[in-house]
Image: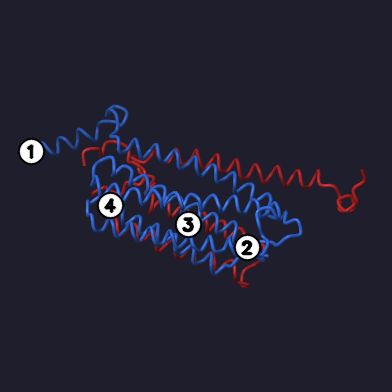
Amino acid sequence: MTDTRYDRAPGDASAPAEPSGVLVYTTGLVLAVILTATSFWVANTSLLWGPGVSMGLIVLAIAQMGVHLVFFLHITTGSDNTNNVLALAYGLLIVLLVMAGSLWIMTNLNDNLMPPPELMHMPMRH
Amino acid sequence: MNDAVAIYDVRQEAFVPASAAGPAPKRIVVAYGFWVFLLSDIIMFSALFAAYAVLVRNTAGGPTGAQLFNQVSVAAETAFLLASSYACGLMTLAVASRRHGATYLGALVTFVLGAAFLALELREFANMIAQGATPQRSAFLSAFFALVGCHGLHVTAGLIWLTVMMAQVAVKGFRATVQRRLSCFALFWHALDIIWVGLFTLVYLMGVVP
Protein backbone atom coordinates (compact mmCIF):
# COMPACT_ATOMS: atom_id res chain seq x y z
CA MET A 1 0.00 0.00 0.00
CA THR A 2 1.32 3.41 -0.87
CA ASP A 3 -0.66 5.44 1.66
CA THR A 4 0.34 3.75 4.92
CA ARG A 5 1.83 7.00 6.19
CA TYR A 6 -1.60 8.65 6.05
CA ASP A 7 -4.35 8.26 8.60
CA ARG A 8 -6.55 5.28 8.07
CA ALA A 9 -10.06 5.75 6.65
CA PRO A 10 -12.91 4.53 8.84
CA GLY A 11 -13.95 1.07 7.71
CA ASP A 12 -10.50 0.26 6.32
CA ALA A 13 -9.39 -3.22 7.35
CA SER A 14 -6.24 -3.63 5.32
CA ALA A 15 -2.99 -3.51 7.23
CA PRO A 16 -0.67 -6.37 6.26
CA ALA A 17 0.34 -7.36 9.79
CA GLU A 18 -3.24 -7.78 11.00
CA PRO A 19 -5.26 -11.01 11.01
CA SER A 20 -7.33 -11.71 7.91
CA GLY A 21 -10.57 -9.79 7.38
CA VAL A 22 -12.91 -12.76 7.63
CA LEU A 23 -11.49 -13.59 11.05
CA VAL A 24 -12.05 -10.02 12.29
CA TYR A 25 -15.69 -9.90 11.10
CA THR A 26 -16.39 -13.40 12.47
CA THR A 27 -14.92 -12.50 15.87
CA GLY A 28 -17.17 -9.45 15.92
CA LEU A 29 -20.20 -11.52 14.97
CA VAL A 30 -19.55 -14.10 17.72
CA LEU A 31 -19.03 -11.42 20.39
CA ALA A 32 -22.15 -9.53 19.25
CA VAL A 33 -24.26 -12.70 19.35
CA ILE A 34 -23.03 -13.51 22.87
CA LEU A 35 -23.77 -9.97 24.10
CA THR A 36 -27.22 -9.88 22.43
CA ALA A 37 -28.18 -13.27 23.85
CA THR A 38 -27.04 -12.13 27.30
CA SER A 39 -29.16 -8.96 26.97
CA PHE A 40 -32.30 -10.95 26.14
CA TRP A 41 -31.55 -13.39 28.98
CA VAL A 42 -30.98 -10.56 31.49
CA ALA A 43 -34.28 -8.91 30.52
CA ASN A 44 -36.27 -12.12 31.04
CA THR A 45 -34.64 -13.86 33.98
CA SER A 46 -35.85 -13.63 37.56
CA LEU A 47 -32.46 -14.66 38.94
CA LEU A 48 -31.08 -11.10 39.00
CA TRP A 49 -31.84 -8.28 41.40
CA GLY A 50 -34.68 -6.34 39.73
CA PRO A 51 -33.49 -2.73 40.05
CA GLY A 52 -30.05 -3.66 38.64
CA VAL A 53 -31.42 -5.12 35.42
CA SER A 54 -31.76 -1.79 33.57
CA MET A 55 -28.19 -0.79 34.41
CA GLY A 56 -26.95 -4.21 33.29
CA LEU A 57 -28.79 -3.86 29.98
CA ILE A 58 -27.21 -0.44 29.36
CA VAL A 59 -23.74 -1.81 30.09
CA LEU A 60 -24.30 -4.74 27.72
CA ALA A 61 -25.54 -2.38 24.98
CA ILE A 62 -22.50 -0.09 25.33
CA ALA A 63 -20.20 -3.13 25.20
CA GLN A 64 -21.90 -4.35 22.03
CA MET A 65 -21.65 -0.92 20.40
CA GLY A 66 -17.92 -1.05 21.17
CA VAL A 67 -17.66 -4.49 19.55
CA HIS A 68 -19.42 -3.19 16.42
CA LEU A 69 -17.13 -0.13 16.27
CA VAL A 70 -13.93 -2.15 16.57
CA PHE A 71 -14.71 -5.28 14.54
CA PHE A 72 -17.13 -3.95 11.88
CA LEU A 73 -16.16 -0.28 11.50
CA HIS A 74 -12.46 -0.90 12.36
CA ILE A 75 -12.21 2.12 14.67
CA THR A 76 -9.17 1.28 16.78
CA THR A 77 -6.75 3.04 19.12
CA GLY A 78 -3.92 2.92 16.56
CA SER A 79 -2.06 6.15 15.80
CA ASP A 80 -3.29 6.05 12.16
CA ASN A 81 -6.87 6.15 13.48
CA THR A 82 -6.61 9.26 15.69
CA ASN A 83 -8.81 11.48 13.51
CA ASN A 84 -11.60 8.91 13.43
CA VAL A 85 -11.46 8.39 17.19
CA LEU A 86 -11.48 12.14 17.90
CA ALA A 87 -14.55 12.64 15.68
CA LEU A 88 -16.22 9.74 17.48
CA ALA A 89 -15.34 11.20 20.88
CA TYR A 90 -16.88 14.55 19.93
CA GLY A 91 -20.02 12.81 18.66
CA LEU A 92 -20.30 10.85 21.90
CA LEU A 93 -19.95 14.05 23.93
CA ILE A 94 -22.92 15.62 22.09
CA VAL A 95 -24.97 12.42 22.37
CA LEU A 96 -24.29 12.29 26.10
CA LEU A 97 -25.20 15.97 26.58
CA VAL A 98 -28.45 15.62 24.62
CA MET A 99 -29.60 12.46 26.36
CA ALA A 100 -28.49 13.08 29.94
CA GLY A 101 -29.43 16.77 29.73
CA SER A 102 -32.95 16.03 28.44
CA LEU A 103 -33.61 13.35 31.04
CA TRP A 104 -32.22 15.46 33.85
CA ILE A 105 -34.15 18.64 33.10
CA MET A 106 -37.40 16.85 32.26
CA THR A 107 -37.31 14.79 35.47
CA ASN A 108 -36.67 17.99 37.38
CA LEU A 109 -39.62 19.73 35.68
CA ASN A 110 -41.88 16.74 36.30
CA ASP A 111 -41.02 16.76 39.99
CA ASN A 112 -41.35 20.52 40.50
CA LEU A 113 -44.07 21.67 38.12
CA MET A 114 -46.45 18.71 37.90
CA PRO A 115 -49.66 19.68 39.69
CA PRO A 116 -50.63 17.37 42.56
CA PRO A 117 -53.01 14.52 41.61
CA GLU A 118 -56.11 16.18 43.12
CA LEU A 119 -55.61 19.19 40.81
CA MET A 120 -54.94 16.99 37.78
CA HIS A 121 -58.34 15.33 38.08
CA MET A 122 -60.41 18.43 38.80
CA PRO A 123 -63.12 19.05 36.21
CA MET A 124 -62.30 21.97 33.90
CA ARG A 125 -64.19 25.19 34.62
CA HIS A 126 -64.45 27.87 31.98
CA MET B 1 13.85 -2.10 -6.86
CA ASN B 2 16.31 -3.94 -4.63
CA ASP B 3 15.81 -4.67 -0.96
CA ALA B 4 18.12 -1.96 0.35
CA VAL B 5 16.17 0.74 -1.49
CA ALA B 6 12.88 -0.74 -0.29
CA ILE B 7 14.00 -0.64 3.33
CA TYR B 8 15.28 2.90 2.86
CA ASP B 9 11.87 3.91 1.45
CA VAL B 10 10.02 2.38 4.38
CA ARG B 11 12.25 4.22 6.84
CA GLN B 12 11.76 7.47 4.96
CA GLU B 13 7.99 7.01 5.04
CA ALA B 14 8.04 6.21 8.73
CA PHE B 15 9.69 9.55 9.48
CA VAL B 16 7.24 11.68 7.46
CA PRO B 17 4.55 12.98 9.80
CA ALA B 18 0.98 13.02 8.48
CA SER B 19 1.02 16.81 8.51
CA ALA B 20 3.97 16.89 6.08
CA ALA B 21 2.84 14.04 3.81
CA GLY B 22 0.69 16.19 1.52
CA PRO B 23 -3.03 15.77 0.89
CA ALA B 24 -4.44 12.37 1.81
CA PRO B 25 -5.82 10.15 -0.97
CA LYS B 26 -9.45 10.80 -1.90
CA ARG B 27 -10.47 7.38 -0.57
CA ILE B 28 -9.50 8.45 2.96
CA VAL B 29 -10.99 11.95 2.70
CA VAL B 30 -14.33 10.59 1.43
CA ALA B 31 -14.61 7.90 4.10
CA TYR B 32 -13.68 10.40 6.82
CA GLY B 33 -16.29 12.88 5.60
CA PHE B 34 -18.90 10.14 5.56
CA TRP B 35 -17.87 9.12 9.08
CA VAL B 36 -18.53 12.71 10.24
CA PHE B 37 -21.97 12.55 8.54
CA LEU B 38 -22.73 9.26 10.31
CA LEU B 39 -21.82 10.78 13.67
CA SER B 40 -24.18 13.70 13.01
CA ASP B 41 -26.88 11.17 12.07
CA ILE B 42 -26.27 9.41 15.39
CA ILE B 43 -26.62 12.78 17.16
CA MET B 44 -30.00 13.23 15.44
CA PHE B 45 -31.01 9.77 16.70
CA SER B 46 -29.89 10.75 20.21
CA ALA B 47 -32.52 13.52 20.18
CA LEU B 48 -35.20 10.97 19.24
CA PHE B 49 -33.88 8.60 21.94
CA ALA B 50 -34.04 11.42 24.51
CA ALA B 51 -37.61 12.28 23.47
CA TYR B 52 -38.61 8.63 23.81
CA ALA B 53 -36.95 8.26 27.22
CA VAL B 54 -38.73 11.39 28.48
CA LEU B 55 -42.16 10.39 27.12
CA VAL B 56 -42.09 6.63 27.71
CA ARG B 57 -44.38 6.73 30.77
CA ASN B 58 -46.91 9.18 29.26
CA THR B 59 -49.27 6.56 27.88
CA ALA B 60 -52.44 8.65 28.45
CA GLY B 61 -54.32 5.57 29.64
CA GLY B 62 -53.42 3.72 26.44
CA PRO B 63 -51.36 0.54 25.97
CA THR B 64 -47.84 0.42 27.46
CA GLY B 65 -44.73 -1.05 25.89
CA ALA B 66 -44.94 -4.17 28.04
CA GLN B 67 -48.40 -4.90 26.56
CA LEU B 68 -47.43 -4.19 22.95
CA PHE B 69 -43.91 -5.53 22.39
CA ASN B 70 -43.35 -9.07 21.17
CA GLN B 71 -39.86 -10.19 22.23
CA VAL B 72 -39.67 -13.13 19.81
CA SER B 73 -40.22 -10.79 16.88
CA VAL B 74 -37.63 -8.34 18.23
CA ALA B 75 -35.08 -11.14 18.69
CA ALA B 76 -35.63 -12.23 15.07
CA GLU B 77 -35.25 -8.63 13.83
CA THR B 78 -32.01 -8.30 15.82
CA ALA B 79 -30.64 -11.54 14.39
CA PHE B 80 -31.53 -10.53 10.80
CA LEU B 81 -29.88 -7.12 11.11
CA LEU B 82 -26.73 -8.49 12.77
CA ALA B 83 -26.36 -11.20 10.11
CA SER B 84 -26.96 -8.58 7.43
CA SER B 85 -24.17 -6.44 8.89
CA TYR B 86 -21.85 -9.47 8.88
CA ALA B 87 -22.71 -10.25 5.23
CA CYS B 88 -22.00 -6.59 4.39
CA GLY B 89 -18.56 -6.97 6.01
CA LEU B 90 -17.83 -10.02 3.87
CA MET B 91 -19.00 -8.06 0.82
CA THR B 92 -16.47 -5.32 1.72
CA LEU B 93 -13.70 -7.93 1.68
CA ALA B 94 -14.91 -9.23 -1.70
CA VAL B 95 -14.86 -5.68 -3.08
CA ALA B 96 -11.33 -5.13 -1.74
CA SER B 97 -10.10 -8.21 -3.61
CA ARG B 98 -12.27 -7.37 -6.67
CA ARG B 99 -14.21 -10.62 -6.81
CA HIS B 100 -17.44 -10.01 -8.75
CA GLY B 101 -19.29 -13.20 -7.80
CA ALA B 102 -18.57 -12.90 -4.07
CA THR B 103 -19.57 -9.22 -4.13
CA TYR B 104 -22.96 -10.00 -5.71
CA LEU B 105 -23.52 -12.91 -3.30
CA GLY B 106 -22.63 -10.75 -0.27
CA ALA B 107 -24.88 -7.95 -1.50
CA LEU B 108 -27.75 -10.39 -2.11
CA VAL B 109 -27.50 -11.87 1.41
CA THR B 110 -27.21 -8.36 2.90
CA PHE B 111 -30.29 -7.24 0.97
CA VAL B 112 -32.45 -10.28 1.77
CA LEU B 113 -31.66 -10.14 5.50
CA GLY B 114 -32.24 -6.37 5.58
CA ALA B 115 -35.56 -6.79 3.77
CA ALA B 116 -36.57 -9.55 6.22
CA PHE B 117 -35.83 -7.15 9.10
CA LEU B 118 -37.96 -4.47 7.45
CA ALA B 119 -40.83 -6.90 6.79
CA LEU B 120 -40.92 -7.98 10.45
CA GLU B 121 -40.86 -4.36 11.60
CA LEU B 122 -43.71 -3.39 9.26
CA ARG B 123 -45.76 -6.40 10.45
CA GLU B 124 -45.17 -5.29 14.05
CA PHE B 125 -46.32 -1.73 13.20
CA ALA B 126 -49.41 -3.08 11.40
CA ASN B 127 -50.31 -5.26 14.40
CA MET B 128 -49.95 -2.31 16.78
CA ILE B 129 -52.07 -0.03 14.59
CA ALA B 130 -54.72 -2.77 14.26
CA GLN B 131 -54.93 -2.82 18.08
CA GLY B 132 -55.52 0.92 18.14
CA ALA B 133 -51.95 1.74 19.21
CA THR B 134 -51.45 4.44 16.56
CA PRO B 135 -48.99 7.34 16.82
CA GLN B 136 -51.92 9.64 17.72
CA ARG B 137 -52.93 7.53 20.74
CA SER B 138 -50.37 8.84 23.28
CA ALA B 139 -47.10 10.72 23.64
CA PHE B 140 -45.37 7.40 24.28
CA LEU B 141 -46.59 5.97 20.96
CA SER B 142 -45.72 9.17 19.05
CA ALA B 143 -42.16 8.97 20.34
CA PHE B 144 -42.02 5.22 19.66
CA PHE B 145 -43.10 5.50 16.03
CA ALA B 146 -40.82 8.50 15.45
CA LEU B 147 -37.75 6.68 16.81
CA VAL B 148 -38.28 3.17 15.40
CA GLY B 149 -39.81 4.52 12.19
CA CYS B 150 -36.81 6.77 11.58
CA HIS B 151 -34.49 3.76 11.91
CA GLY B 152 -36.76 1.80 9.54
CA LEU B 153 -36.59 4.63 6.99
CA HIS B 154 -32.78 4.54 7.21
CA VAL B 155 -32.84 0.78 6.54
CA THR B 156 -35.14 1.35 3.55
CA ALA B 157 -32.77 4.00 2.18
CA GLY B 158 -29.87 1.58 2.70
CA LEU B 159 -31.63 -1.17 0.72
CA ILE B 160 -32.26 1.24 -2.18
CA TRP B 161 -28.64 2.41 -2.02
CA LEU B 162 -27.38 -1.18 -2.10
CA THR B 163 -29.48 -1.95 -5.19
CA VAL B 164 -28.11 1.14 -6.96
CA MET B 165 -24.55 0.17 -6.01
CA MET B 166 -24.95 -3.33 -7.45
CA ALA B 167 -26.21 -1.81 -10.71
CA GLN B 168 -23.11 0.44 -10.72
CA VAL B 169 -20.80 -2.54 -10.13
CA ALA B 170 -22.49 -4.36 -13.01
CA VAL B 171 -22.30 -1.42 -15.41
CA LYS B 172 -19.11 0.42 -14.36
CA GLY B 173 -17.11 -2.34 -12.67
CA PHE B 174 -14.78 -1.77 -9.69
CA ARG B 175 -13.58 1.70 -10.58
CA ALA B 176 -12.37 4.05 -7.84
CA THR B 177 -15.61 6.04 -7.51
CA VAL B 178 -17.69 2.86 -7.18
CA GLN B 179 -15.32 1.46 -4.55
CA ARG B 180 -15.54 4.66 -2.51
CA ARG B 181 -19.34 4.57 -2.63
CA LEU B 182 -19.35 0.92 -1.61
CA SER B 183 -17.13 1.64 1.40
CA CYS B 184 -19.47 4.49 2.42
CA PHE B 185 -22.44 2.13 2.11
CA ALA B 186 -20.71 -0.43 4.36
CA LEU B 187 -20.07 2.26 6.99
CA PHE B 188 -23.73 3.32 6.79
CA TRP B 189 -25.01 -0.24 7.15
CA HIS B 190 -22.78 -1.01 10.17
CA ALA B 191 -23.81 2.29 11.82
CA LEU B 192 -27.49 1.34 11.45
CA ASP B 193 -26.77 -1.87 13.33
CA ILE B 194 -25.14 0.13 16.14
CA ILE B 195 -28.27 2.29 16.41
CA TRP B 196 -30.42 -0.85 16.48
CA VAL B 197 -28.39 -2.11 19.49
CA GLY B 198 -29.39 1.03 21.40
CA LEU B 199 -32.95 0.68 20.12
CA PHE B 200 -33.66 -2.89 21.11
CA THR B 201 -32.06 -2.33 24.52
CA LEU B 202 -33.70 0.99 25.41
CA VAL B 203 -37.10 0.48 23.77
CA TYR B 204 -37.87 -3.21 23.67
CA LEU B 205 -35.90 -4.85 26.51
CA MET B 206 -36.14 -2.01 29.06
CA GLY B 207 -39.79 -1.63 28.02
CA VAL B 208 -40.67 -5.11 29.26
CA VAL B 209 -38.52 -4.96 32.44
CA PRO B 210 -40.94 -4.17 35.28
The chain ID associated with circle 3 is A
Name the chain letter of the residue that bears numbered label 2.
B
What residue is disc 1 on?
B1
Q: CA distance from mark 3 to mark 1?
A: 46 Å
For the colour red, the matching chain is A
- Give the label on residue A64, or none: 3
Dot 2 alpha-carbon crowd within 10 angstroms: few under 14, some 14 to 19, many 20 or more:
some
Residue A30 image offset from top left, x and y in percent: 40, 64
As shown in the figure, which amino acid type bears the numbered disc 3? Answer: Gln
The one nearer the camera, B125 or A64, is B125
Residue B155 image position (x, y, % from top left): 46, 52
Give how far across and how far down residue B2 sits, in percent. Answer: 7, 39
User: Nearer the observer, disc 2 or disc 4?
Assistant: 2
Residue found farthest to the right: A125
Q: Which residue is mark 2?
A: B128
Q: Helix, strand or loop at disc 2?
A: helix
Quadrant into which the N terminus of chain B falls: top left
Do badges 1 and 4 share one subunit? no
Inspect the image, locate mark 2, and give the three-letter code of the amino acid beneath it: Met
Disc 1 marks which amino acid?
A: Met
Secondary structure under tag 1 reads: loop
Circle 1/circle 4 CB separation < 8 Å = no
Question: Earlier along the polypeptide chain: callout 1 or callout 2?
Answer: 1
Q: Which residue is mark 4?
A: A18
Contact between marks 3 and 2 (CB within 8 A): the answer is no
